[in-house]
Amino acid sequence: MRRHCEIAATTCAWSIVLLALVPFIAIVALSFMQFRGPVLHAAFSMRNYVDLFATAGGPLANTLLFATLAACGAALIGVPVGWVLARTRSPWTSLLDVTATLPFAVPGTVLAIGLVIAFNSGGLVLTGGWLIMVLAYTVRKLPSRCARRARSFTRSTRHSKRRPSAWVFRRCAPYSFWSSR
């Protein structure tokens, strides 16, 4: 019984993952096809990639550089914040938690307009430079770096008798979860 439950859960999980990957697979497949104007031809070639690196190598390198700098900045800020949030409990950590996850609630366009307004004049003018792009990427990716805290919190608050009951009665974890409610 347990083996059948594991196989069904694995099949369901892989089906969901593959379904979510269909748009990306389609984009990769279309990137190898030839376009002549708006018409798509089924002939596969590497011509699109040759053109990409020949004509847009600079913007592609800038994008990769900015994303790398933003990921490093988000990790430098988010990992210590996540550690503090996971290890301490106080009113200040609640405020820090809300502040760190606020970019999830703010749409990207609103965040960009806010950054432009904030850094368009005054002592620190970043608008028009590369640093505002890195700042925007960092602020946008910061909540995902703090997600480690959320995972550790859910692990610590999970009911401790549910998983061992699944092991004792040789049932899969979802079955024991629904049956122990």
Image (cartoon, rainbow, N blue to C red):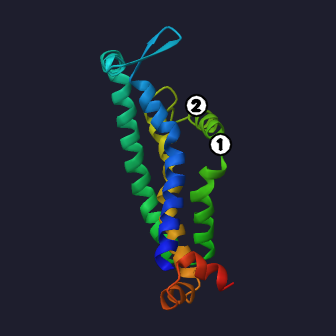
Q: Residue at x 60, y 50 (%)?
A: 103
Disc number for residue 149: none
Q: Tell me if 146 is positioned left or right of 55 in this view.
A: right
- Element under disc 2: loop
**Residue 28 % position (x, y):** 42, 32
Dot 1: within a 10 Å radius of its alpha carbon, few (fewer than 14), some, or many (20 or more) residues? few
Q: Which amino acid lies under the numbered mark 1 shown in the image of this protein?
A: Pro
In this view of the protein, can residue 174 be seen by the observer?
A: yes
* Percent position of residue 151, x then y: 51, 69
Residue plotted at (52% across, 53% down): 15
Q: Residue at x 45, y 37 (%)?
A: 25
Q: CA distance from mark 2 to mark 1?
A: 23 Å
Q: Look at mark 1 in the image and give the residue it sits on.
A: 107
Residue extending farthest to the right is 181
Which residue is rendered at x = 33% and y = 22% of the image? 49
- Which of these two is toward me, 64 or 181? 181
Asked if the residue at tag 1 contacts the one at tag 2, i.e. Cβ–Cβ closer than 8 Å, the answer is: no
The location of residue 60, given as percent across then percent down, is: 37, 27
Q: How many marks?
A: 2
Q: Looking at the picture, does residue 21 appear above or below residue 75?
A: above
Percent across and percent down for residue 63 are: 40, 32
**N-terminal-most mark, 2 or 1:** 1
Q: Amino acid at mark 2?
A: Ser
Compared across the picture, whether 55 is left or right of 141 comes to left
In which image quadrant can residue 94 be found? bottom right
Where, by quadrant of the figure, is residue 150 drawn? Answer: bottom right
What residue is disc 2 on? Answer: 121
Q: Mark 2 or mark 1: which is in front?
A: 1
User: In this rendering, is residue 179 above or below 46?
Assistant: below
